[in-house]
Image (cartoon, rainbow, N blue to C red):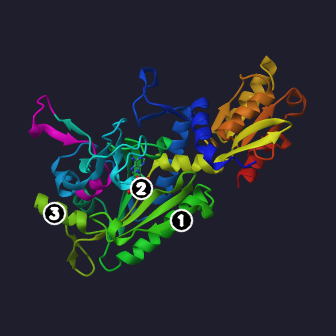
Amino acid sequence: MTVPRDQLMEKIVALCKRRGFVYPSSEIYGGLAAFYDYGPYGTTLRRTIRNLWWRSMVELRDDVVGLESSIIMNPQVWVASGHVGGFSDPLVQCLGECKERWRADQLADMHRCPKCGGPLSEPRQFNLMFKTYVGPVEDSAAVAYLRPETAQGMFVDFKNIVNSVRVRVPFGIAQQGRSFRNEITVQNFIFRVRELEQMEMEFFVRPGTDDEWHAYWVKERLRWFAEVLGVDASHLRARPHDKDELSHYSKATSDLEYDFPFGWGEVEGVANRTDFDLRAHQEHSHEDLTYLDPETNERYLPYVIEPALGVERTMIVLLLEAYDEEDVRGETRVVLRFHRNVAPVQAAVMPLSKKQELIAPAREVLGLLKPLYRTEYDQTGGNIGRRYRRQDEIGTPFCITVDFDTLNDRAVTIRERDSMEQERVPIAGLVERLRERFA
Ligand code: ATP
């Protein structure tokens, strides 16, 4: 059953709340716009996304290393990077009834409020960085910023990394972590949040090879979405920026866009940042940030290709890809058809009833699967049909049921999420059978 596109987001938001994926932050106090908390399944989904990215971008490669830099850095970093001067969006305010604020570049009509039709103010630049103070004195010398991107950590630690670990251009530095943007307009659930989790990699290359590497990373990142996360490739596209759209640091950027219910939207940006950042930090810090090629003895500032994305948008993509409803014997079955790699629970083990004699074999089966898969033990929650439906809603590919026959035949039932088909398998062969079915 296809769910109408205009209802999809609403349904996903409701499911995320109902099943413990995403809650509004500090909800008992009325929440805080564009801040969210992630419940048990949301947390697992986010960790899984981060782990799959880290595995592909760092662990399975021999040319990328990791970094965790601090969220609050010396404020000069943000002067050099251009964020203090230029990380801003044009803000307009409704001068009519509703007084709503808007991002001018996102309005179809720059003169009329989309909500109440009132006149709009002239645009003024609004800096998106959150400010705070370091230390006990709240004066201008103590002002610092919560980072709006993780990337600058990689540039300011470039020299440390080159001097302390064995890396040679071309190589990358990858980082995952929180970034903060005081976005003017927030909408579409977790698509645009004010506290986000970024996954960024700065890949340092020899100038002149940058176009080639840029093309490589666009292709590689599309492959990751399709092969590792199971995203339908026809729902994704790479859209090169027009010249007037490029950021101040970029020579070329391709957005990897997803076909959201509200239109094509950026999930990841792959930018050719040239040597803009290293050059800027070299000038402002007066430190030599050039790289000495040990083979040719040439010294240069490397160019940088940056694939950068957020966990939140990746989450929405996965939820949109997965969400489905179907009619089963007159009832609507809601199912998240998550790819096996991303399902927060990959196998749920459930005794048919709470009878003591079923618990021991169910726990035994759980013990077999726990080291291999993300598992859940589901003993409560009513009859088996209701428990299957709950697992369907959180996207569990396989439920393993222990019933009274198990006590005699030492076999269990594997129930598959999408087809709802059941298969009887001896406990002794369960691990092997699941391995085949996950393959
Ligand atoms: P947009 O044009 O949508 O504001 P951006 O071009 O400013 O995004 P980048 O600076 O390229 O975004 O950030 C890299 C990635 O970080 C984006 O592709 C997106 O996945 C994520 N991201 C950026 N801002 C937000 C936000 N406010 N909420 C959620 N994710 C974000």
Q: Is residue 145 magenta?
A: yes
Q: Nearer the viewer, mark 3 or mark 1?
A: 1
Q: Which residue is mark 2?
A: 108
Q: Give percent across and percent down for residue 39.
A: 52, 32
Question: Does the image show residue 341?
Answer: no
Question: Does the image show residue 192?
Answer: yes
Q: Secondary structure at mark 2?
A: loop
Proximity of marks 3 and 1: CB atoms separated by less than 8 Å: no
Q: Secondary structure at mark 3?
A: helix
The first of marks 3 and 1 along the sequence is 1
Residue at image position (45%, 73%) is: 215
Q: 339 above or below 162?
A: above
The amino acid type of the residue labelled 2 equals Ala
Q: Give percent across and percent down for residue 266.
A: 46, 57
Q: Which residues are magenta?
A: 135-156
The amino acid type of the residue labelled 3 equals Gln
Front-lying residue, 85 or 378 = 85
Quadrant hosting residue 403: top right
Q: Which residue is mark 3?
A: 282
Residue at image position (21%, 74%) is: 300
Q: Secondary structure at mark 1?
A: strand
Quick one: label 1, few (<14), some, or many (20+) residues within 10 Å? some
Q: Give percent across and percent down for residue 321.
A: 63, 51
